[in-house]
Image: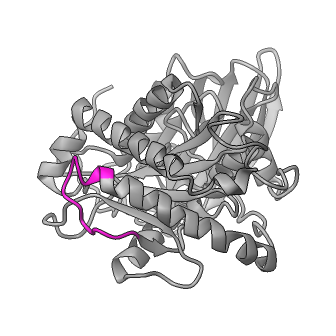
């Protein structure tokens, strides 16, 4: 399906995945009913998401039908328009859950959406208020009923959605024994953003979520070649994962280190260079770090979560354990920043700190690497190349090796 050119004044551009956009809206009846302005489908093996964006909040009812298996959603107080009519063309053949989609005007004020399913699913529907230039959304998440073998992510997402993420977490994340000697070093790689949250974008429409996923895959391949290391990824697809679930997955696999990979943007295209950040529980070390943490932490609002989730840990335990973890994170970040300086200009030569939600594992040294500014045209070109993506992966691995060679955290894993 071809789409005309369009301009969307959003701080973060939603593009890619299946998307249909309404280019003009009739003024007739605007006050009385909602108008659907976009429909998007994000398929992944973990879960598939369909979002309906509208000019006002949507009311809905859902029910299931069998022979064949279908999910039916009646959306109230709207009229069928060209955007909704195009939903069937958004379904990809490789979607694990949705076989096809169709819509119709069920009655004078109700549009019926029917999703024919490939397998039995556990649907979760919820609405989201406007955020970052995105209007009201109705979200349909389709989770598999059967668990995915050897992947804790689905169970963690279920716990998160039910407000039980803190339960069944290990008392201490790292495995017993000395990392790299008695057992392999476990690294959690976190490609930022994903799915409904594209992250930042460049002038050439390069999307942060795509670039950092490629870097994460390169890094995992390098780590897995090391005899005393193994790597996991918070996501290995174009899927939205809430920030707290990323942290919980690192703890579930008993990771020794957590590396979140990003390529952010700034209002000025002159901004350039690589940076490394660690957590601060007592305010940001710079205005830039504070701004970056705020933009990264709104990922959950853009990606869309159905609830805020539980408080991760009580503050007494959190502060006691995390003081040492932050100290280790700064040492780890320094090693990675030094190696990043060998492949790119450094935006700042010291580690910055702020309240990044994705770095809040209390017992896992965690850093966030800004690989380059995707808003800088020269650096955007660099970010698009496999050569630079591989250089970033090698630089991070070199930092990991140097950190453990210095014995910085071995005492914590006896």
Q: Position of residue 332 (x, y in %)?
A: 48, 57
- Place residue 165 in its image quadrant: bottom right
Q: Main secondary structure of the magenta part?
A: loop
Q: Is residue 31 left or right of residue 187?
A: left
**At 38% from the left edge and 34% from the top edge, which residue is drawn?**
214
Q: Which residues are magenta?
A: 339-351
Q: Nearer the viewer, residue 250 or 364?
A: 364
**At 35% from the left edge and 57% from the top edge, which residue is drawn?**
337
Residue 344, magenta (yes or no)? yes
Q: Is residue 242 left or right of residue 67?
A: left
- Place residue 175 in its image quadrant: top right
**At 43% from the left edge and 68% from the top edge, which residue is drawn?**
295
Q: Nearer the viewer, residue 151 or 41?
A: 151
* Outermost right residue: 168
Q: Is residue 306 above or below residue 400?
A: below
Q: Is residue 330 above or below residue 75?
A: below
Q: Nearer the viewer, residue 16 or 159?
A: 159
Residue 231, magenta (yes or no)? no
Q: Position of residue 325 (x, y in %)?
A: 63, 65
Q: Position of residue 245 (x, y in %)?
A: 67, 51
Q: Is residue 213 above or below residue 192?
A: above
Q: Position of residue 43 (x, y in %)?
A: 55, 31
The answer to whether residue 353 is visible is: yes
- How many numbered discs, if any? 0
**At 22% from the left edge and 57% from the top edge, which residue is drawn?**
375
């Amino acid at each position: 399906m071809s789409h005309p050119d369009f301009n969307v004044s959003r701080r973060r551009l939603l593009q890619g995945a299946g998307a249909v956009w309404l280019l003009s809206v009739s003024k007739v009846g605007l006050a009385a009913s909602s108008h659907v302005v976009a429909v998007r489908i994000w398929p992944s093996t973990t879960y598939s998401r369909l979002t309906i964006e509208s000019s006002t909040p949507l009311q809905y009812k859902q029910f299931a039908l069998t022979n064949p298996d279908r999910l039916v959603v009646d959306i109230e107080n709207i009229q069928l328009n060209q955007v909704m009519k195009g939903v069937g063309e958004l379904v990809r053949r490789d979607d694990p859950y949705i076989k096809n989609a169709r819509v119709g005007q069920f009655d004078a004020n109700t549009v019926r959406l029917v999703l024919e399913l490939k397998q039995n699913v556990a649907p979760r529907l919820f609405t989201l208020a406007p955020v970052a230039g995105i209007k009201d959304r109705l979200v349909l998440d389709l989770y598999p009923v059967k668990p995915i073998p050897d992947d804790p992510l689905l169970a963690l997402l279920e716990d998160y959605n039910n407000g039980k993420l803190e339960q069944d977490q290990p008392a201490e994340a790292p495995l017993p024994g000395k990392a790299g000697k008695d057992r392999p070093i476990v690294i959690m790689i976190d490609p930022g953003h994903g799915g409904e949250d594209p992250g930042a974008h460049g002038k050439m429409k390069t999307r942060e979520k795509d670039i950092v996923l490629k870097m994460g895959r390169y890094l995992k391949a390098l780590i897995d070649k090391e005899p005393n290391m193994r790597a996991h990824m918070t996501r290995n697809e174009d899927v939205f994962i809430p920030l707290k679930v990323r942290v919980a997955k690192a703890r579930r696999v008993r990771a020794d280190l957590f590396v979140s990979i990003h390529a952010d943007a700034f209002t000025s295209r002159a901004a350039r260079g690589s940076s490394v950040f660690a957590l601060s529980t007592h305010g940001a070390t710079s205005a830039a770090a504070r701004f970056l943490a705020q933009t990264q932490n709104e990922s959950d609002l853009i990606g869309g979560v159905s609830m805020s989730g539980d408080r991760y840990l009580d503050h007494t335990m959190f502060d006691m354990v995390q003081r040492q973890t932050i100290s280790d994170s700064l040492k780890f970040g320094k090693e990675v920043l030094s190696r990043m300086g060998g492949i790119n200009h450094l935006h700042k030569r010291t580690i910055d700190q702020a309240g990044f939600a994705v770095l809040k594992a209390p017992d896992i040294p965690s850093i966030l690497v800004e690989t380059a500014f995707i808003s800088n045209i020269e650096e955007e070109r660099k970010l698009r190349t496999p050569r630079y993506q591989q250089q970033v992966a090698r630089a991070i691995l070199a930092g990991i090796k140097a950190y453990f060679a210095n014995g910085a955290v071995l005492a914590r894993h006896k």
